[in-house]
Image (cartoon, grey):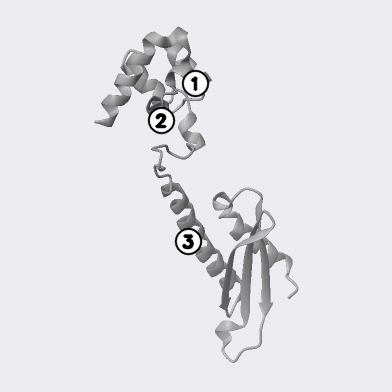
Amino acid sequence: MALGDDLEVFIRGKFRRIDHLLPRNSYFDVVVTREPTREVQGHYVARANLIGSGSLVMRGEESAGDPHVAIDTLVDRLEERLSRQHSFIQSERRVTARGNLPPTPDEELVHPSTLEIILGDHGVDDETIARLEESGIVTLEQLRAAVDDGRLHARLGTRFRHAEHDLVKIVDQFRA
């Protein structure tokens, strides 16, 4: 169906509401059709396909007697589904078989990080904390994994041998 300018503006405004839930480099392909039905409530059908990385990610369809109502209901349902999917992805950060967590979200990498605060409270000097960050250890889980695998000495080097013992003690405290 040929969309009027007001309906197109309405669609763009409604779908802009859920932009923050969309994966990167994805977009919605929206089609509104008028289908002849016996019931007035089903004359207008709004279909939306969420396309991400060149493939279909999610599909939604709603019908109503007015195209604005069909689009509004469709956006509400898609927002609910995307929100559920987003919270499910966030809750899937579980410990792996080797005891490591998946990569941390970007918001965990702000300064001072939780690891910096914990180590600072336990009297670890700033130079050792900076060396840990340089070697890629920015979370307590990563520090624990380095201690468990025996890689802490290799990551810190011989210059920080004095701090290695303290770091192992701190990790052991958080296990108990």
Q: Residue at x 58, y 83 (%)?
A: 42
Local packing at callout 2 (Cα closer than 10 Å; few below 14, some 14-19, many 20+) is some
Q: Secondary structure at mark 1?
A: helix
For disc 2, the marked residue is 145
Reading the image, the residue beneath label 1 is 133
Residue type at numbered disc 3: Glu
Q: Quadrant of residue 47?
A: bottom right
**Farthest residue in the left direction?**
176
Residue 80 circle label: 3
Q: Residue furthest bottom?
A: 38
| Horizontal relation, residue 146 to residue 74: left or right | left
Of 18 and 102, nearer the camera is 102
Placement of 24 over or under 59, stated as above or below: above
Q: Earlier in the sequence, mark 1 or mark 3?
A: 3
Residue found at the far front of this picture? 150
The location of residue 163, given as percent across then percent down, is: 38, 12
The x and y percentages for residue 1 are: 73, 76
Residue 95 visible to the viewer: yes
Quadrant, the C terminus: top left
N-term-proximal mark, 2 vs 1: 1
The answer to whether 85 appears left or right of 59 in the picture is: left
Query: Image height check: is 85 above or below 59?
Result: above
Determine whether, in the image, residue 23 is placed left or right of residue 105. right
Binning the other alpha carbons within 10 Å of mark 3 as few (below 14), some (14 to 19) or many (20 upward) gives few
Label 2 vs label 1: CA separation?
Answer: 14 Å
